[in-house]
Amino acid sequence: MLILSSLLLFILTTHSEALTPAAARDEFQEELVIRPLHSGDIYASFQFRTLWDTDFLQEGQKVSHYRLFPKSLGQVLSKFSVRELHISFTQGFWRTMQWGQPFIPSPPGAELWVWFHDTVSDVDGNWKELTNVLSGIFCASLNFIDLTNTVQPSASFKPLGLGNATDHRFLRYATLPREIVCTENLTPWKKLLPCGSKAGLAVLMKSEKLFHSSFHSQAVHIRPICQDEQCSSKAWELRQTLNVVFDLHTSGQGKKEWSLFKMFSRTLTEACPLASSSKVYVDITDNPELFELSPATPLLGQAVVLGDRRTYSVYDLSRAETFGQLRSFNLLLRDMLRPLLHAERYVAGFGLQTGEIHTVIYNNHPYRAFPVLLMDSVPWYLQLYIHTLTVTSKSRDNKPSYIHYQPAKDRHRPHLLEMLIQLPPHSMTEVTVQFERALLKWTEYTPDPNHGFYVGSSVVSALVPSMVAMRTNFTQDQPLFSSFVPVKEESSYFVRVYTEPLLVNLPTPDFSMPYNVICLTCTVVAVGYGSFYNLLTRTFQVDEPSPPLSKRLANLIRRMRGVPLLT
Amino acid sequence: MAAPLTLLLIVAVTIRAVLFRSSLAELISARVEVVSPLNAWKRVVEGLALLDLGVSPYSGDVFHETPLMIYLFHFTVDYAEIVFIIADGITALALYLSIQTYNKDVFRKQKYALESDRYSADCLELLRSPKEMFYIPLKVAMFYLLNPFTILSCVAKSTCGLNNAIIALFIFCTLKGSALLSGILLALATYQSIYPLTLFAPALLFFLQRLYIPVNLRRSSFWFFTLQYAFMYVGSLVVITGLSFFLLGSWDFIPSVYGFIFSVPDLTPNIGLFWYFFAEMFEHFRLFFSCVFQINVFFYTIPLSIKLKEHPVFLIFMQIAIISIFKSYPTVGDVALYMAFLPAWSHLYRFLRNIFLVSCVLLACSALFPVLWHLWIYAGSANSNFYYAITLLFNFGQILLVADYFYAYLRREHHLTHGLYLKKKDGTEATLVLK
């Protein structure tokens, strides 16, 4: 009895593999590569790879348990006996001269090329059905692909994955250059990802930003590959790629300052839990001192891509410390050209009555604070209110140690404001002062009064700490450009920064009205004068109506005759 | 009458306190109809800030208050809201007590006139009874405290409220018969803004009437009292001006305050007639028209004094109204002061000719001022002519109002002496005209 049961157990365990099919291993990796381009644009390339140890093409075995691999694509592969599938949707044209080479090239419009298995008898029929099915999956009008625009290239598109068949009868290639890519195509593409657009790198793919770019391309590449060097086992690889180039002026507002938030209006909060690796690479080969990366990362990687050895800063999203305290990862690339001292000025407020002058002074020195002298000369027709003067550094009040203020006298002299402000290191200091706009006499306006009135630049003068010790002695053979400002100290140099001039609109009277105004105002004054004059010089009398003309004439004649008058 | 007055004061203080605490206070302080370059609170704060910086407030062209204001607000700048509420309360109380005294005076004079048979037989309807005059002081106080113009002026912390308080106290002291206090307060009012100088004549006439001195230029008693009063007035003025000199140690304030009032260099729009006129003026006429406009305020004094020498209180009302309309930087606070007197002449209602038109014009203009200002300055869809037109209309309405009350007053006096129901020679009903 015991022997029987143990034998049964032995048989069961040895044949367990035959009773239950082997669980296929699948693996998902996601990656984002960011490459700043020479023109100031930025190139972001997403790649999502799913590897699956299964065989779609094996006869008799129907794959039914899908995990990371999307079921719709798996069914397409088995039904149409597809060996390799490459489909891409692109908006825009890749400008090689300006941007270099892309990681995954693609033509504008839609492109589809497929290698069928050599067991297929009717390739054209399969091709037709395949295009229709893919058209449904990707919500694109791929059904326009038919025999009139399909070719069978003999040499160009060799298989990228495994496969020794070189019979180009099993290859089909078609493009639809007219195809437009939009959100409708992005959404089903995102659905094919294991985490969808809910976690991992795919959360960055929001259409309002992605389609507001110079170049946008999404693609799906499916091919069988070898798992190892000896090719003992094969696996299916699905790569979903998305390449996008953001324009400096359209998305970047002209500033060479890029961040994940600026590009995608999202930040990363977590890696995809189903991914075995989730990484962000930033290409820092081109002059690593040109831009600074934050948050900083110690990981560096090198890779040879497109014939060039390039260095990358690597961010591993599977590690929790990448996300920092705020659980949010926002990569920042900033142009490193940061002068130590610079200033900006602008007018805030609305309407023609009041306004505010804001002067912003930046101290970009990492650890040294130094004082600056700010001089403002504001014309008399903008009446400054010095009690509204505020100086804030790092959102705290920063009282200037010396203020010299000479208020303006109307039509005699302008305002003069001089302040000595201590700038904390690596900070932005904002000086604000409110003003009121005056109405001027009509002759004091320029011929184009609605252009506005100019306010001269503010002057920021400072002794900025120098990185390099300077010689204070006078030498004859110094070049002219370095000998303008006399050097008094070794460790600091004198710098004068001018801000922008301001253009301020003043309320204008109507210039066609002098005569009318004099007439109308004097009329109102005269009405007052007239009423008072009447009331002061006249008295009330009973109104006796004058007798009619006939009676008056009769009275006249009677008077001449000396006869009593009529009443 | 103490209880209703207290209730009125409480209501008024509550309204002002509520508005001070709301976000409207900021908005109202910036409105050009309520504040002018002469009396804006922002400029007072600016002047005090300049003083703290070590710069004389009069070295620039922002601050145009007198040195005594600097003194006052140097200590009370943190309690400014309370100061202005108290000022309004003082004004209302002073007006209340003045009108009470005036009513007693009116009733007494009416009694004498009836006894000496100076009134004609059929004008009994025009006589005033204590019953109808009982609530007039309360109405005057109410007209001042609850007038939206006054409330706006108080919430904006315009120093016009303080000027009104001084003028109201001056009226109170005059009507109570104290010549010295009246002189001192009139000097203070003149020191603040020059125009109350014209109130010297009605105050003088009132005292002469009260002391039974006939207004006759040939009589020595007239000149004796006039010189006494003038001496008290001018003396106080000199003392106050001297004190101001010692505050800052210079005479800078005279061109800054009085020179500013007379030469009108700042053309900020307001509800008066000066700003647009001088903005569009031809340069070579500027001096001429400045003189004309300034003389216009002062020169009604003598003719009005001659016509109204028996009625000095009405003359005070007329003078204050003329100052408010024709001064160089009027605000609604000035308008509120003479409007407070209107209940005292409520018995003239039957003789007013244009009251409906005038009230409609004033209401419409008050509503249109902020609208057209917004359209000009913020929306950019109107231009300065729109605002100027409403200014013209507002001043026209005010002139009509004052002229109407003057007409009604004179007509009532005529009817009192000549009878109410006048007949023509042929016995039919007569119409009165000014000839």
Image (cartoon, coloured by chain):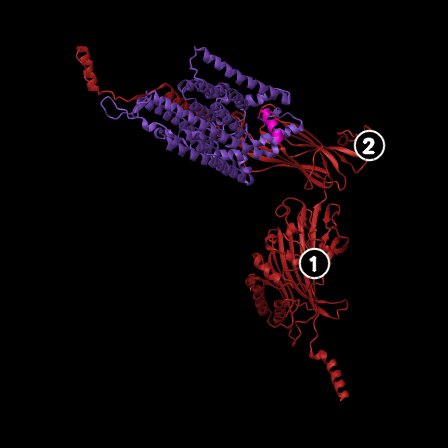
Chain colours: A red, B purple
Q: Which residue is mark 2?
A: A471
Amino acid of disc 1 = Glu
- Residue visible at 54% across and 21% down? B184
* Quadrant location, the N terminus of chain A: bottom right
Report how many numbered discs are placed on residues in the image.
2
Does the magenta run of residues contain B70?
A: yes
The chain holding disc 1 is: A
x and y, in percent, of residue A109 in the image: 59, 57
Amino acid of disc 2 = Arg
Residue A228, can we see it? yes
Does the magenta run of residues contain A131?
A: no
Q: Is residue B167 above or below residue A145?
A: above
Discs 2, 1 touching: Cβ within 8 Å: no
Residue A31's tag is 1
x and y, in percent, of residue B392 in the image: 44, 29
Circle 2 crowding by C-alpha within 10 Å: few under 14, some 14–19, many from 20 = few
Q: Is A160 or A192 nearer to us in this picture?
A: A192
Quadrant housing residue A120: bottom right
Q: Classify residue A58 as left or right of residue B412.
A: right
Residue A340's tag is none
x and y, in percent, of residue B270 in the image: 50, 30
Q: Is residue A330 above or below residue B384?
A: below
Residue stretch in magenta:
B64-75
Label 2 residue SS = loop
Circle 1 crowding by C-alpha within 10 Å: few under 14, some 14–19, many from 20 = many
* Sequence order check, earlier mark of 2 and 1: 1
Label 1 residue SS = strand
